[in-house]
Amino acid sequence: MRRLFLWMARNRWLERNLPRLPFTRRAVARFMPGDDADSALNAAADLQRAGIPAIFTRLGENLTSAEEAAEVAEHYANLEEKIAAAQHHGEISVKLTQLGLDFDEDLTAAHVGRLASRAARNGTVWLDMEGSAYTERTIAFYERLKPTNPNIGICLQSYLRRTADDLQRLLPLEPAVRLVKGAYSESPSIAFHTRADVDANYLALAVLMLAARRTGINIRIGLGTHDLRLIEQIVGHATSLGLPRSAYEVQMLFGVRADEQRRLARGGFAVRVLISYGSAWYAWYMRRLAERPANVLFALRQLLPG
Amino acid sequence: MRRLFLWMARNRWLERNLPRLPFTRRAVARFMPGDDADSALNAAADLQRAGIPAIFTRLGENLTSAEEAAEVAEHYANLEEKIAAAQHHGEISVKLTQLGLDFDEDLTAAHVGRLASRAARNGTVWLDMEGSAYTERTIAFYERLKPTNPNIGICLQSYLRRTADDLQRLLPLEPAVRLVKGAYSESPSIAFHTRADVDANYLALAVLMLAARRTGINIRIGLGTHDLRLIEQIVGHATSLGLPRSAYEVQMLFGVRADEQRRLARGGFAVRVLISYGSAWYAWYMRRLAERPANVLFALRQLLPG
């Protein structure tokens, strides 16, 4: 099932045609408040009232020109102003390939540095993690920028075997880490391929971050997962380590386990919701379906009338 | 399947009658070289030549008198002398209920203290962990004895929710920990009950011990598992943490994955094999069958002729 959707994510014919079907758009609406930043900001305002701040990200594909990258950077700079104006505790997440990583790393660094310096209330600018072809470059990019831009964060994926190394490599930088399981199709030689292994590694990486925090390393810990049993296990370990609930943050996607998001926030946990928007949602949405059978069920229900 | 064997482990009628069947004894022989200490020592000599030292334990049930406890203590004291005479790097593992914990904790402490002081080359005297009724008392007992008996170790079970707390509680003592998944039937309120949760917690506890070791805490880490995928994940994390293979030890049972034991030892890993012996093997053997479907298959094969 997971492989089917990851194949669909890469299929160009489906990418052109599936989004035209009305039921597809209805299904996607569950995870995406709209195509533009204002829809995302409106959805965030509701969540903010429930004590749940947001991370905003515009969906997009790899770019090939400096002009396109400048347009994306400009878009995020405008978004930062809107976040500041709305007095949200909002943050942004960017894909480095959207800011020019494929053709000009210095340009990308300039864009990220500018967005970080302008972030409202020094909120974090998160670097998203893409397929494994970009892992090393993204980690190295983070190592390069973090010392002069303290408010940037990075996403690490527990399905990659290298992530334990990457975490140890980044710890001296006192990083902000958004830990996810990983949603791309990767080879077993570089990635764990059973759910149990990916989950166990997720828990291990999370407790290593918590243990580092306990020893005084100023790491920001974002748990990017909807797996409540995993969250429960991590909370148990955090408590054993004597860490308060403010020592970490649960980060979920807009529309996924929305009730749980509010329940956790009411229970005193720091919760943050990632809101995606934009027209390039097809591949992103297929990866969401690959992640969770429950999402597929929801999508199929949109096929039924009324 | 697991529950069936755990039920069989507690059934008194089966305990009386199953061991009389020849095929049962043939099946048990795979995991137990014999009924007495000399059979265990002979088996250990073979393993020692392959660079694999042993931990010896005599199987037994809860005792009710000081005389019985004294007999067990005397047995282990004799065993320690035989280990020293054989120049094995052997260690022993004891069950506290076999040394009087149910009726006289001070007496038990005296027995354990004496065995620890006499252990050959200061090898560790391991305290086994029994069902959850004994967890708190065993932890407290360890806290009491460890400061004056540096060479005692304790077994912790990853299926218990409390174990993360217990580990943090014991770390300041610089403990020797044999980490196992756990083989008793415990309530979901105190124990994880899916294999994935138990495994994930095992990995998390192992990496927490490795991380503690990296920060300079002199903890001895025994990985009591036959789960090779789990071991592989732990080795990956140990490497990421910059720890050598000598920083931890794989501890397996005699006869379980014997080829892997030798393969790991040849590969430079510290491996130790737990050899059980004695006539009270019925409940112990049923817990082994509950642990692994492969063990059941082996047992069933003994039913076939030739």
Image (cartoon, coloured by chain):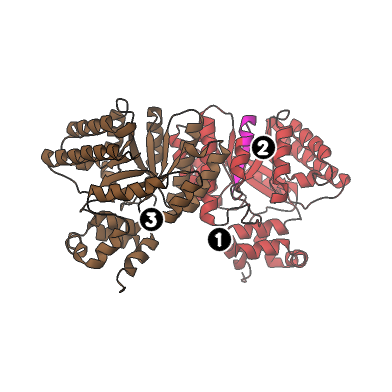
Chain colours: A red, B brown
Q: Which image quarter is the C terminus of chain A in?
A: bottom right
Q: Secondary structure at mark 1?
A: helix
Q: Residue at x 33, y 40 (%)?
A: B90
Location of mark 3 (residue)? B256
Give x and y (percent) for residue B114.
Answer: 23, 31
Q: Residue at x 55, y 61 (%)?
A: A294
Tell me, yes or no, whether the two marked residues, 1 and 3, touch with CB atoms within 8 Å. no
Chain ID of residue with mark 3: B
Circle 2 or circle 3, nearest the eye:
3
What kind of residue is marked 2? Gly
**Range of residues picked out in magenta:** A169-181
What kind of residue is marked 1? Ala
Give x and y (percent) for residue B260.
Answer: 45, 53
Q: Nearer the viewer, residue A47 or A63?
A: A63
Chain ID of residue with mark 2: A
What kind of residue is marked 3? Val
Q: Is residue B114 above or below residue B11?
A: above
Location of mark 1 (residue)? A294
Give x and y (percent) for residue A127.
Answer: 70, 41
Q: Residue at x 55, y 51 (%)?
A: A198
The answer to if A179 sits in the magenta stretch is yes
Q: Residue at x 57, y 65 (%)?
A: A297
Location of mark 2 (residue)? A153
- Mark 2 and mark 3: Cα distance apart in space: 45 Å
Q: Is residue A186 visible?
A: yes
